[in-house]
Every structure is written in C-alpha cells, then in structure tokens.
Amino acid sequence: MKNNRIFISAGDLSGEMHASSLVKEIKNINHSCRVSAVGGNNLKSIADDFLEDIVNINAFGLVTINQVIYLRKVLKKLKNHFVKERPDKVILVDFYGFHIHVSKLAKKLNIPVYYYISPQVWASRGGRIKKLSKTVKKMIVIFEFEEKLYKRNGVEAVFVGNPLIDKVPKKQNFEKRDFNTSNPPTIGLFPGSRKTVIERHMPIILEVAKILKEKINAKFVMFSVDKKSNLDLPKYVDLDSSGDFEKRKCIDFSICTSGTVSLENALIGIPMVVIYKLSYCNYFLIKAIIKTKYITMVNILSERSIVPELIQFNATPQKIASSALEQLSVGNYMPKVKELLAFRNTLGVPGVSKRVAEIILKD
C-alpha cells in the first residue's frame, strides 16, 4: 500500500508528544510522505497540513458543551478532508472519546486505521474494545499485557515498548545518603499539567513542603508545564518550567499526581508519593467504574504497591509528608531507587517511534 499521504491525530499533551516523534520517523523512512494532522503545537510544527488544534482546548474527562460543539466541527472538517484528500492511512493516538468517531469516518471510506497508544480499556469501560475492533486495523500498544488483552478479544495488536523509554533518561549515579537538616534532599513538586488539577493540588503540596522544610530543611523545585505561569511560591521553592529531564534527574524525591509524570519519575529512578484529589462528584463517579486496584502505572504493571498512593481523603499534607519522610530514611531510600530502575526494564527497549513507523509503513 502507498504511504504518501498519512493523517495523524492526537488530543492531549503527552499523546501529541509521541505523535510528533512518530511523524519524524515516518518522514525519515519515506521522504515523500505528506502528513496532515489534528493535534497541538508539536504536530503543527512538523505536519505538512495542520487542520485543527484539539490539544489546547483541554478536552479531557467531562468536557464542556463548548468543547463538544468544537470537536463536532472538527469531525465535520475531517470528513471533508478524508473524502477530498483520501489519506492512505489514518493514525490515532490515545484520546478515545474523539478518536472512535474519527475511526468510524475512516472505516466508511475504507481507509485503514492504526491506533497507537491504547485507551485504558483495562481500567474501565472494557466495552470499548468491541467498538475498536470494528474500525481499527491494528492496535499498536505500549504495555505488553495490552497486546494479550486485545488478541484475546480478536483484535490484531502488537506491543512495541513504551515511547518514554526513548525520552526519559535514568540516573546513572546514586549516593547513599542520610537525608537530614545538614544534608537535605531536593524534592520535586508536580501539581499536574491542567489548570483545574493544579488548583486542587497546589495548596496541599505547598503545605507538605512547609512541613518537610521544618523537619529536614529540604530544598524544593516546583515543576510546571506552563512557561508563562506566575505562581505565588514561597521563597524556598524554586520554579522550573523547562521540561528538561536532565534537571529532573537532580531531584532526590518527588511528590506528584498520578499519570504520565509519575511514570516518568519512576523511569528516572526517583522515589515518590503519588497524590490525587477530585471533586466529590467526580471521585465517586470514577470510583464506581474503575476496575484496577491502583491508579499509578508503576503499581498497576507491577501488581503491587511500589509507589505509595494517597488518594482523595487520604491526600492530606500530614500523611503525604509522613510517607515522604519514611521513604527518605536510610534503610528505605536506595532499595526503592533500585526497585524503580528494575521496573524500567519491563517497558521494552529504545527505538519505539521508529518501530511504530516501520510497522505502519510496511503493513
């Protein structure tokens, strides 16, 4: 099959980052390939034809009416694009709620669909697998158990490894340290990447920092994805919006929300405590549909609690600070680091984006 016209879509920051890496590899293999895209700033910078920005509307979870209206307009535009341009292949990256409709559009026009990075069907709403099986030619998954899950349900799937392996470095040297007031740790603070999440977690995290500052005189770095953020931080909390993993390697411990950032920190080898709070309504709604025992990928994949999770009512400053102090103790710190680095080896080998590009272009 020809590969001169590829369409790709990604709807969130992390997915779009992986989508842009994939486009680069596709173009390296097929220099004549023309790529049209829906996504955000990363895809806009590399696509030959950028159609719409769906990343920066923050369409996640329970979307607003305005977001729904906008996404419907995007779908209408994509239908016209598919009919007029007839891409050879469609690549969808995560973001199920929108992409299931895009896959249906492509299926009606007999355009093969490749779904890269599976929605978390194993955590909730398993019925989505059946819907995906009707429109997707191949699932390209980043966790090994997902390949088996899809194949059991009659969906062609292939495990390629986790793309974070190529992006996230691991610490090379670790000091066996006794963290105390005269030898304080550097603690990374990660309140989240979305405005509502940050607003909910920031007061808790800053209170934790205050407690730890008094007990072990710790140093703190607030990691924010918003380069324009004007956060009102205490003088003892530095701000880093660079997104530079090399800088993150310098921290000893992290307090972070669940999601991509916790997996990134695990791959680097940074012990952590994971926290998360939702509105009461959303919490009870999600609790009713989630099937997994844990919410952090390290724990889910390991099937045990490697990383402490303090969720909702347990996400108090006192409990979070106590968990941090326990893990920073002499007997607990280095074993935890080694455990996290051993976990890294379960996520595949480097070269993920290149493998994905080869699979799609050769299929």
Image (cartoon, rainbow, N blue to C red):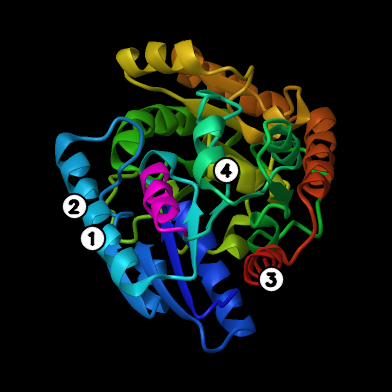
Q: Is residue 241 visible?
A: no
Q: Which mark is residue 73?
A: 2
Which of discs 2 and 3 lies nearer the camera? The answer is: 3
Residue 227 position within the rendered picture, expressed as x and y whole percent measured from the top left: 34, 61
Q: CA distance from mark 1 to mark 2?
A: 6 Å
Instruction: Report the predominant secondary structure element of the magenta stretch.
Output: helix
Instruction: Assess whether residue 109 is covered by the magenta stretch.
Output: yes
Name the amino acid type tagged 2. Lys
Label 3, on which residue? 362
Label located before the other in sequence (2 or 3): 2
Q: Nearer the viewer, mark 4 or mark 2?
A: 2
Q: Are marks 2 and 3 in contact (CB under 8 Å)?
A: no
Residue that carries the numbered disc 1 in the rendered image: 77
Mark 3 falls on what kind of element?
A: helix
What's the distance in space between the residues labelled 2 and 3, CA to CA? 33 Å
Instruction: Give the residue at mark 4.
Output: 118
**Element class at badge 4:** loop
Q: Residue at x 70, y 32 (%)?
A: 149
**Residue 248 visible in this rendered orientation of the protein:** yes
Which residues lie in the magenta part?
A: 100-110
